[in-house]
Image (cartoon, rainbow, N blue to C red):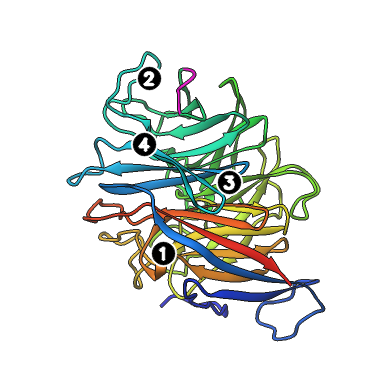
């Protein structure tokens, strides 16, 4: 029997607004006492869900904010497989989710190019917007390690990829990676396990890459208080934001291996800019009545100093990590203050199952994208979708 935490989680009904109080100091969540209120927040779903893929089965959605424009990317899989012909598409929207650019190819995996041969498919990937360029970390068919690609905003490939990693998939699993940028470099994060070691000794490998696609610093990190897995996220946070006194990367992962006999939640930890673990920075931040996992698309809000973390939940006890586990289940965004006090948990996709939740938040807006494809690719329909939430204060 898995041990449940004392946390109380609220199922959220779409198109409702919710008001919470962020207190001046944090306290144990089991306590009913409160401190003096400083800010009252409300979160309201204002637009969506909107389907991204015009046809086919959508999966692997990403979202980028470029000033007043949103760039949403997603793949479309054919009806009979998710291992072939998954070209990448994109649409653009204004900040209210009014479509500006209809569906276009970002990457046609069957097209010829002097810079790269995708060999008819594109694997797991993440994207990040840095200045006038879109950068991608991707699993590319025929390559032993992941590739960093550089595009303009119309997805014209500008250079040959830079391939990074140790080249041993039993040591460094590059699927479901993390990816972010600090305004001058991009950072790729992978799951690292050297040898047959207990899960408490699993770590993260992180690589810094310049905008000219030159490999910079790298490190292998072993966070305390949790196990690093695949299906992770990473965010750059500059000094002075979210209460931090130095530039750092903030990493997110499930806190135990999938299939663990104990309850699996989400934890986070800090990485300094020398690619070293910040001692004492590990913190469990989320737990539910069943296992939760895949915090692949976290973000933070500068204006309101809030974290937004997306994740999915198993459908029944033992589902995640089981031989027939779909990794497709109830999915959420959870919103925290800068001290990791949970303010609101919102179920997305109109309470339908979802997976691979990605977020971006800026000003008073939260944008969420996800898809409905299970890991076996058995879903006959799968929508890549986008939602827009408004943050208000009282």
Task: Tell me the CA gap for discs 4 and 1.
Answer: 22 Å
Residue occupying image coordinates x 33% and y 54%: 383
- Give SS at disc 2: loop
Percent x, y for residue 299?
60, 52
Quarter of the image that includes the N terminus:
bottom left
Q: CA distance from mark 3 to mark 2?
A: 27 Å
Q: CA distance from mark 3 to mark 1?
A: 23 Å
Instruction: Measure how far apart labels 2 and 1 are at the Cα level.
Output: 36 Å
Is 307 drawn above or below residue 118 in the view shown?
below
Between residues 199 and 351, which one lies in front from this camera angle?
Answer: 351
Residue at the disc numbered 4: 88
Q: Secondary structure at mark 3?
A: strand
Q: Read off the residue under disc 3.
A: 234
Provide the residue span drawn in magenta.
155-159
Q: Earlier in the sequence, mark 3 or mark 2?
A: 2
- Disc 2 target residue: 116
First along the sequence among labels 3 and 1: 3
**Are there few (<14), some (14-19), or many (20+) residues within 10 Å of tag 1?**
many
The mark closer to the camera, 3 or 2, is 2
Task: Look at 25% across and 51% down and name the residue there.
Answer: 377
Is 68 left, or right, of 28 in this rendering? left
Figure check: 281 above or below 220: below
* Residue at x 49% of width, y 19% of height: 158
């Amino acid at each position: 029997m898995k041990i449940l935490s004392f946390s109380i989680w609220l199922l959220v009904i779409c198109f409702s607004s919710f008001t919470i109080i962020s207190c001046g100091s944090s306290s144990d969540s089991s306590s009913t006492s409160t401190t003096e209120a400083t800010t009252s927040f409300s979160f309201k779903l204002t637009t969506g869900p909107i389907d991204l893929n015009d046809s086919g089965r959508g999966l692997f959605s990403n979202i980028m904010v470029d000033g007043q424009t949103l760039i949403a990317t997603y793949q479309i899989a054919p009806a009979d497989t998710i291992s072939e012909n998954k070209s990448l598409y994109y649409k653009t929207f204004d900040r209210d989710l009014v479509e500006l650019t209809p569906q276009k190819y970002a990457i046609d995996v069957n097209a010829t190019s002097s810079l790269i041969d995708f060999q008819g498919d594109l694997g797991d990937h993440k994207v990040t917007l840095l200045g006038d360029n879109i950068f991608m970390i991707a699993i590319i068919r025929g390559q032993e390690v992941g590739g960093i690609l550089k595009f303009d905003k119309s997805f014209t490939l500008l250079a040959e990829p830079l391939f990074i990693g140790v080249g041993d998939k039993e040591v460094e699993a590059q699927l479901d990676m993390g990816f972010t940028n600090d305004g001058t470099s991009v950072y790729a994060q992978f799951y690292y396990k050297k040898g047959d070691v207990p899960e408490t000794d699993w770590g993260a490998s992180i690589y810094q890459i310049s905008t000219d696609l030159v490999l910079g610093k790298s490190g292998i990190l072993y966070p305390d208080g949790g196990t690093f897995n695949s299906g992770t996220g990473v965010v750059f946070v500059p000094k002075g934001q979210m209460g931090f006194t130095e530039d750092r990367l903030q990493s997110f992962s499930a806190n135990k291996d999938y299939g663990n006999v104990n309850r699996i939640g989400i934890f986070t930890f800090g990485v300094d800019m020398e690619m070293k673990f910040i001692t004492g920075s590990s913190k469990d931040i989320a737990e539910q009545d069943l296992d939760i996992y895949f915090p692949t698309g976290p973000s933070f809000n500068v204006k309101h100093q809030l974290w937004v973390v997306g994740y999915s939940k198993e459908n029944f006890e033992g589902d995640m990590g089981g031989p027939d586990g779909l990794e497709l289940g109830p999915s959420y965004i959870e919103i925290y203050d800068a001290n990791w006090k949970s303010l609101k948990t919102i179920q997305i996709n109109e309470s339908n199952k979802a997976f691979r939740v990605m977020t971006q938040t800026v000003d008073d807006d939260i944008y969420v994208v996800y898809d409905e494809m299970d890991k076996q690719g058995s879903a006959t329909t799968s929508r890549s979708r986008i939602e827009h939430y408004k943050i208000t204060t009282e």
